[in-house]
Image (spheres, rainbow, N blue to C red):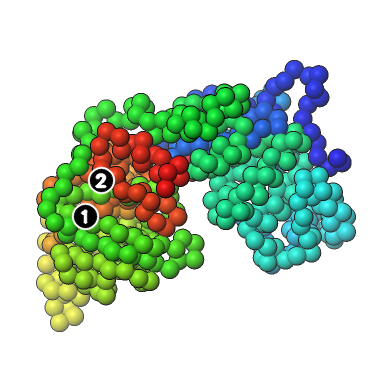
Amino acid sequence: MTQIHTSSPPQAEPRPIVSLDHVTKRFPGVVANERVSFDLWPGEVHVLLGENGAGKSTLVGMLSGLQLPDEGGVLIDGREVRIASPARALELGIGTVFQHSMLVPSLSVVDNMALGGKWWSRPDRDGVARRMAAVCADIGVTIDPHAKVGSLSLGEQQQVEIVRALMRGSRVLILDEATAMLTPKGAEDLGALMGRLTKLGIAVVFITHKLNEALAFGHRITVLRLGRKVGEIAPERLAALGPAAATAEIVRLMFGAGVATDETAPAPRRGRRAGAPLLEIEALAVDDPSVPVAGINLSVSPGEIVGLAGIDGNGQKQFAEALAGQRRLAAGHIRLGGEAIERLDVGGRRQRGLRYVTDDRLGEGTVGSFPISLNLLLKQVGEAPFWRHGLEQSDAIATHARRLVSEFDVRTPGIETAIGKLSGGNIQKALLARELSGAARAVIFAKPTYGLDVQNIRATRQRIREAAEQGLAVILISTDLEEVLELSDRVAVMSRGHIVGVVDNDADARSRVGELMSGVTA
Ligand SMILES: Nc1ncnc2c1ncn2[C@@H]1O[C@H](COP(=O)(O)OP(=O)(O)OP(=O)(O)O)[C@@H](O)[C@H]1O
């Protein structure tokens, strides 16, 4: 064992390698971490769990040098440190491996290892390869130093990153959703590798959304929720609980009632349904290299809100875009009011009353440099009464815009203001105005409150409720379980491109949805 610097000598008082001491980190409109304390011990895999937005990446960002805390301290071996950059983190022995590889695919493994060396010195490829071979032997992985990184699997690329971090002296490794893009076998290999690293005294922070991985690979588990630490299960307790009881406890911590979010929120809707389905989706499939979507069956009645819960990136966006006509269907049928609409384009579906409120408000939802008035008609350009014989009817466009701006309370200096100048909340109001006006019959909301402040969140949720009350069939895609449970009549859970379950939003819904989301039940 030559390369790896192991933990403190056994006779020393045991203490964490790294501690976060009551750290608080705020971003505009959100407290991402609130007085969170976190200890990482040598030789352990410490799993960080929590829903999208719970604050996991922010917390580890304070260790990897991406964020500085607003309050609270960071300690290494008991000494307070300031980690102001990733380079500083590496100097302090903290290496980070992200979900997406940070390596240069066109270079060989050794050349990637040599990157970041002194630019004037020629890379000592043999020396690097020798040191690499020693670390690989220590941790039990085999990597061809001369292979081009682009030809390696994602799992192998992560091994390269881990080896690189160890060669630079890391004794703490942060794996931020490192298994998210891996095959089950790749994830298993990474889990086994984590186990070997911990035997060498390395400490690993492992962020995952999958409970089975947390239990299989983790020694200690911390759960975050809405920026707060809501529980920590120490190794002895984790072992004593066993998988079933530990799962129940984690699901309760992650999803259970008990964290006050918005006491003034209206009582949740529960299982209202009216009449025959209006929007019917049958065996829908979308080809997508990252998340193929297949076998989606879902129907929504007029006045019903079906929530689509799930961890971000499980095919929700592909599904929504295919439904709205922005992506080709590989298979399946979509009917609106009994009429097959899968062959219609975006405009055709919109005319029939199918609407889509995208989560990409400034990218695909609006044209930032265009005035609000035109953005409100972006999907009707050329149509009467706003255009006649190819000519813009400015009076009709202005009247329409003024009416929607007032009805949807868009705060703007005027209807000619470029929409990109408005706040996120007001852009969202304009999008809602465009999609919910006219002869809307069914609407898909994609993460409708993402990034909004509390007031705008409330206003948007109220619009969604009103849309259902007016008889629209609503699909609400959200990674915020509280939102889904507050608004939906039924909840479908999406995972790896499939709907893995649909439950009525009754008293048991929270735990059942939580289990489906974390892959405990399928
Ligand atoms: N740079 C930033 N600017 C503004 N807000 C941010 C920034 N980074 C994070 N946030 C917000 O802080 C909160 C916590 O985000 P964070 O990314 O830490 O959560 P997470 O648990 O890692 O989520 P996920 O599982 O989706 O990665 C969220 O509300 C997020 O929108």
Residue 459 location, quadrant: top left
- Tell me if 69 is positioned left or right of 441 in this view: right
Q: Which residue is rendered at x = 74% and y = 49% of the image?
A: 163
- Mark 1 residue element: strand
According to the picture, the residue beneath numbered tag 1 turns out to be 300
Where 324 falls versus 257 (above or below)?
A: below
- Tell me if 140 is positioned left or right of 157 in this view: right
Q: Provide residue 192's location: percent of width, then percent of height.
A: 67, 44
Q: Provide residue 333's location: percent of width, then percent of height.
A: 27, 68
Q: Provide residue 417's location: percent of width, then percent of height.
A: 26, 57
Residue 490: assigned label: 2
- Tell me if 470 is positioned left or right of 134 in this view: left
Q: Which residue is rendered at x = 71% and y = 36% of the image?
A: 198
Q: Amino acid at mark 1?
A: Val
Q: Nearer the viewer, residue 522 or 98?
A: 522
Residue density around tag 2, few if under 14, some if 14–19, many if 20 or more, within 10 Å: many
Which tag, 1 or 2, sits closer to the chain's start? Answer: 1
Where 309 falls versus 244 (above or below)?
A: below
